[in-house]
Image (cartoon, coloured by chain):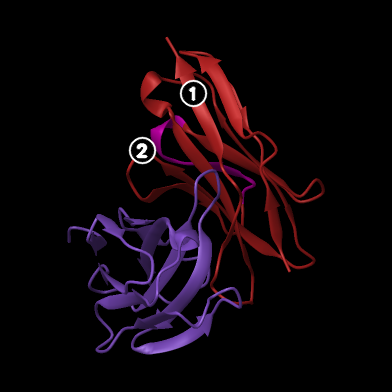
Amino acid sequence: DTGVSQDPRHKITKRGQNVTFRCDPISEHNRLYWYRQTLGQGPEFLTYFQNEAQLEKSRLLSDRFSAERPKGSFSTLEIQRTEQGDSAMYLCASSLAQLGETQYFGPGTRLLVL
Amino acid sequence: AQSVTQLDSQVPVFEEAPVELRCNYSSSVSVYLFWYVQYPNQGLQLLLKYLSGSTLVKGINGFEAEFNKSQTSFHLRKPSVQISDTAEYFCAVVVSGGSYIPTFGRGTSLIVHP
C-alpha cells in the first residue's frame, strides 16, 4: 500500500470560487479524517467518517464546507464560496476504528485563496 | 474538554546534542498520547504513542517519551540529534473511552544546527 494520497497538492483560487479536494485512504482503513492546518498551528479537526457515515463535524466548520465518502473509500472535501480565511493546508488521515489507533496522514492540499 | 500545551514554539540545538520537547495536557479522564513529526511539505508521521503499560515509550529515529500522570506531561527526548531531525513536532491527546478525535498542540519547531 502506498499510504494516504491527496489531490491536488496545491490549489490557488479566487475568492468566491468553489474548490474540491480528494483523499484516498489506506485501503483497509475504515476511518477517514479531515483536518485544517494553518501556519504555526497544529492540525485542527474538521470532520470524520467511519466507512461512508459522517459521524462528527467540528462546530467550527462553516456551512460552506461539505465532505463526502460515498462508498466508504475515497473522500472529497468541498469548500463553496471560498474566502481568504480558508487559505490553509488541508490534511487527510485514515485509521482503523480502534481507540488509540495510529492515524496515517496524507501530504496535504495547500489552498491559497486570492 | 482536553487540551495540549507545547510550551516551546522553537527549539534550536546543535548537532549531536540532547534535546527535550515539552508537552503538557489537561484532561479529567485517562488519555492516550502521541507524538508526530512533520517534515517540510509533508504530512504528519507517527513517532511514538502511549496507550498503557510502561510509561517510557520508545519510537522511531531514536526518540523516546515518558508519560508522567502526576505532572500530566509527555515530554519527547533524544540523546543525540541529527541535522535530519530538523522538523515540526506535534503532541496529541485522545481521551480514552471518548471519541477517536485527537487534539493537537501548536507544535514545536526543532532546528538542528551543524
| Residue linked to disc 2 | B40
User: Do we see residue A98 in this rendering?
Assistant: no
Q: Residue at x 51, y 28 (%)?
A: B110
Q: Is the residue marked by circle 1 packed among few (<14), some (14-19), or many (20+) residues within 10 Å? A: many
Q: Determine contact: label 1, label 2, CB under 8 Å.
A: no
User: Do we see residue A74 in this rendering?
Assistant: yes
Is B106 above or below relative to A19?
above
Amino acid type at circle 1 is: Ile
Q: Residue at the left extreme?
A: A1
Q: Helix, strand, or loop for circle 2?
A: loop
Is A51 above or below relative to B112?
below
Marks 1/2 same chain: yes
Is A54 above or below relative to A90?
below
Q: Earlier in the sequence, mark 1 or mark 2?
A: 2
For disc 1, the chain is: B
Q: Is residue B70 magenta?
A: no
Is B40 above or below relative to A112?
above
Q: Colour of chain A?
A: purple
Amino acid type at circle 2 is: Pro
How many circles with numbers are drawn on the protein?
A: 2
State which region is magenta.
B54-62
Instruction: Identify the image quadrant of the N terminus of chain A.
Output: bottom left
Q: Residue at x 37, y 81 (%)?
A: A67
Q: Helix, strand, or loop for circle 1?
A: strand
Q: Nearer the viewer, residue A111 or B108?
A: A111
Q: Which mark is residue B111?
A: 1
Image quarter for residue A76?
Answer: bottom left
User: Residue B113 appears at what percent x and percent y?
Assistant: 46, 13
User: Residue B82 appears at what percent x and percent y?
Assistant: 41, 20
User: Residue A93 appears at what percent x and percent y?
Assistant: 37, 64
Give the chain ID for the red colour: B
